[in-house]
Image (tube, rainbow, N blue to C red):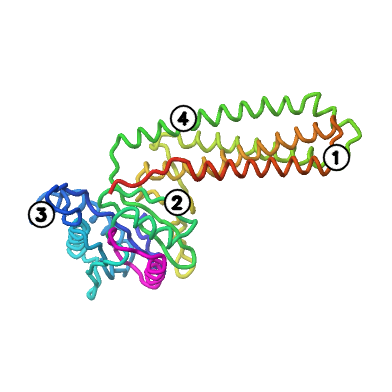
Amino acid sequence: MPGAEDTFMDHRLIFLVRHGSRIPEPLKPEREHGIEDFGTTRFAQPTRSSIIAGSLADRVDSMTGEKITGIIFSPHLAAKQTAEIFRDVLSTRGCLADNYRFEANETVLDPNAQLTEKTEKEYIASLEKDSFLVIVGHQPQLTRLAKGLLGRRLPAHTLPLGGSEVACIQLGDDPRLLWLLTDKPPDLKKDLSEKIKSKFDVAKFFISALIINASVLMSSTVTGVWKSQMPPLVTAFMILGSIMLVVSLGLAVGTLLAFDRLTMPREFWSEEPALSKSGKKAKSPRPPYWSVLRPPSEATIVLFYEMVHAWTHFLQPALLTSIVSIMSFLLAVAASKLCLPWDYTIGIFLGLLLLGGVLLWYYWRTKPKLGFED
């Protein structure tokens, strides 16, 4: 939409760029490895780095009156060469301010630096006072910077940047990841679609099992407890179980609807256009906190973030509430049929919650940790 990003001129933006793909050179240290598409004739034919730099120039052009104020890069050769390509393209396109900075940062962006938490926080605080900077670095340093700038607002707590790819972060009162400029291989979208379908199958199996178990729990056994003269504690467990069961069913249905929508072919995607207003009431396009804008973000990036959001905000809470529901019903039945004392029943309930918390903590500490290929 022409002019849709004009209203971003009141916000501070940071552009995080991962360095281009390096050429391995066994006889040189890693910091001296150059990138594949760098050279004096690199603009004779467009390269990955220059194409993405051109896309960034297009975005800056749409922000009326804004210029890049600085390009900061890691001292590694790959990052420096990537920064030079972006500088050349942005300069040719007239996107750089007259007094822009072009400098290396050896304290935070160098992956070999002995970085302290204090130094990193001070650097992030300095970025929050700046605007329209291009930062060229490595992973996972760029993701750490994004987490420092956005906190919990970084979608999926990760930044899936490949070589020379760009992430735009908006700072200010409403910080968020706005979009990513990427060039992902076509096979990646196919693999991601298959992953979404597998999660869809898991969600369908879960809701089927949940409905069956709900029917069993609501059968004659639970109904018999409801009809009996229930102590207040049993009544409380029955009410808690019923509420959690309804919540779990609602979240499970939401999971199915979310994954069903994600399986829609991208040719049929649609979204509400940004409202066109003038002055201070102008409304700029802005993604939800769990995703990014499309365009300019690729469909693959949007699918990834939406898939993670559906899994963590729908299915996982549905699993947790269903477990609490079943546990509450079972304790209500046990307390009613076995005439357990209230303090004994409460102790069992708290013990089960503690055990569940320990298991979740154990899973969180031992689940697979995927790193970045630099």
- Which image quarter: residue 8? bottom left
The reply to whether callout 3 and callout 2 are in contact (CB within 8 Å) is no
Kindly identify which residue carries mark 3: 39
- Please tell me which of labels 4 and 2 falls first in the chain: 2
Any part of residue 363 in sight: yes
The percent coordinates of residue 364 (x first, y second) are 51, 44
Q: Report the Cα–Cα distance between label 3 and label 1.
A: 79 Å
Q: Nearest to the eye among marks 3 and 1: give it.
A: 1
- Please tell me which of labels 4 and 3 falls first in the chain: 3
Of all residues shown, which one is farthest toward the bottom? 99
Q: Report the Cα–Cα distance between label 3 and label 2.
A: 35 Å
Q: Report the Cα–Cα distance between label 4 and label 2.
A: 22 Å
Task: Tell me, yes or no, whether the highlighted magenta stretch contains residue 121.
Answer: yes
The percent coordinates of residue 173 (x first, y second) are 49, 67
Q: Is residue 247 left or right of residue 94?
A: right
- Please tell me which of labels 3 and 1 falls first in the chain: 3
Instruction: For mark 3, give the secondary structure.
Output: loop
Kindly identify which residue carries mark 2: 157
Q: Report the Cα–Cα distance between label 4 and label 1.
A: 45 Å
Kindly identify which residue carries mark 1: 341
- Please tell me which of labels 1 and 2 falls first in the chain: 2
The percent coordinates of residue 94 (x first, y second) are 21, 66
Residue interval drawn in magenta: 110-135
**Which three-letter amino acid code belongs to the residue tagged 4?**
Ser
Kindly identify which residue carries mark 4: 198
